């Protein structure tokens, strides 16, 4: 029985499978090199398809970028919201729950973080606007979380909360970049590492208070 052309891929690969291969390769290329430096031709070569076929599947370069961005943006938002909504007494602190959610969502496609946080997107483009939507939504969640943490600590200065949100974004980016360079580290291992680093930082700051 002949497979309908609308569902056929190339070299015997079903179209749905080929599309997933293209998205995986494109996500890695966009994440590693940025939108501006990434070419559709390079992605096609990686997957082993022709450039016209890739355009047939996904349209323009911007359309392909959006097809990479939206799934990871949605999953990151869902992961953060789920982590922040957990209120079990035995649950880890909210920051660690959020980090666990981020690492889990990014597992197997760590470069996807930099698809979302890409400074080379064309200003005013649909790609830039959609990425900004996800970044702003993540920042809003981070602002809510950091304000709650500071309030618990007795601090209500809005500039403190804004600074902590900014620092949190930078910390997440730095940790993901480190994780990319250490592919053997699982999401669970990264979460445990974050817990150790948090405890160490707290101990160091507490020791500084004792010296004053």
Image (cartoon, rainbow, N blue to C red):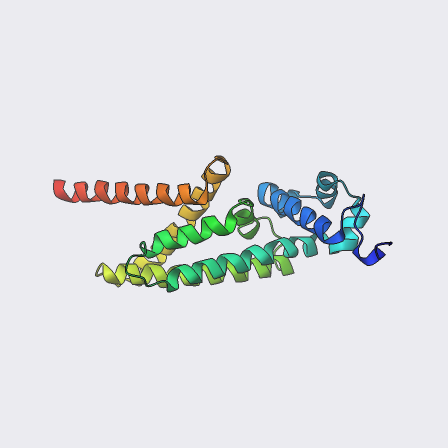
Residue 208 found in image quarter: top left
Q: Is residue 195 left or right of residue 1?
A: left
Q: Does 13 appear above or below 181?
A: below
Tell me where residue 200 appears, x and y as whole percent.
27, 40
Which residue is more in the foreground, 134 or 188?
188
Count of residue discs: 0
Q: Looking at this rendering, what residue extends furthest in the front direction?
A: 1
Which residue is more in the foreground, 12 or 118?
12
Q: Quadrant of the C terminus?
A: top left
Q: Is residue 90 left or right of residue 64?
A: left
Residue at 38% from the left image edge and 45% from the top image edge = 191
Residue at 69% from the left image edge and 56% from the top image edge = 63
Tell me where residue 77 appears, x and y as whole percent.
49, 60
Residue at 79% from the left image edge and 50% from the top image edge = 9
Q: Does 212 appear above or below 87?
A: above
Q: Quadrant of the N terminus?
A: bottom right
Q: Does residue 6 appear in the picture of this structure?
A: yes
Tell me where residue 86 appears, x and y as whole percent.
36, 62
Tell me where residue 147 appears, x and y as whole percent.
32, 62
Q: Does residue 155 appear in the picture of this structure?
A: no
Q: Is residue 183 left or right of residue 202?
A: right
Q: Looking at this rendering, what residue extends furthest in the right direction?
A: 2
């Amino acid at each position: 029985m002949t497979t309908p052309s609308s569902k056929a891929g190339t070299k015997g690969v079903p179209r749905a499978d080929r599309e997933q291969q293209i998205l995986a390769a494109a996500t890695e290329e966009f994440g590693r090199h940025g939108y501006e430096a990434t070419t559709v031709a390079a992605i096609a070569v990686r997957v082993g398809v022709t450039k016209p076929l890739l355009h047939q599947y996904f349209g323009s370069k911007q359309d392909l970028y959006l097809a990479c961005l939206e799934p990871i943006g949605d999953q990151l938002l869902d992961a953060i919201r789920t982590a922040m909504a957990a209120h079990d007494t035995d649950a880890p602190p909210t920051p660690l729950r959020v980090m666990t959610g981020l690492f889990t969502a990014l597992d197997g496609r760590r470069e996807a973080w930099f698809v979302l946080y890409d400074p080379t997107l064309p200003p005013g483009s649909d790609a830039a606007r959609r990425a900004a939507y996800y970044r702003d939504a993540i920042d809003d969640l981070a602002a809510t979380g950091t304000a709650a943490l500071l309030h618990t600590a007795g601090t209500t200065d809005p500039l403190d909360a804004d600074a902590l949100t900014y620092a949190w974004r930078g910390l997440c980016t730095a940790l993901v970049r480190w994780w990319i360079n250490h592919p053997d580290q699982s999401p669970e291992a990264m979460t445990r590492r974050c817990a150790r680093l948090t405890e160490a930082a707290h101990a160091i700051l507490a020791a500084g208070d004792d010296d004053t």
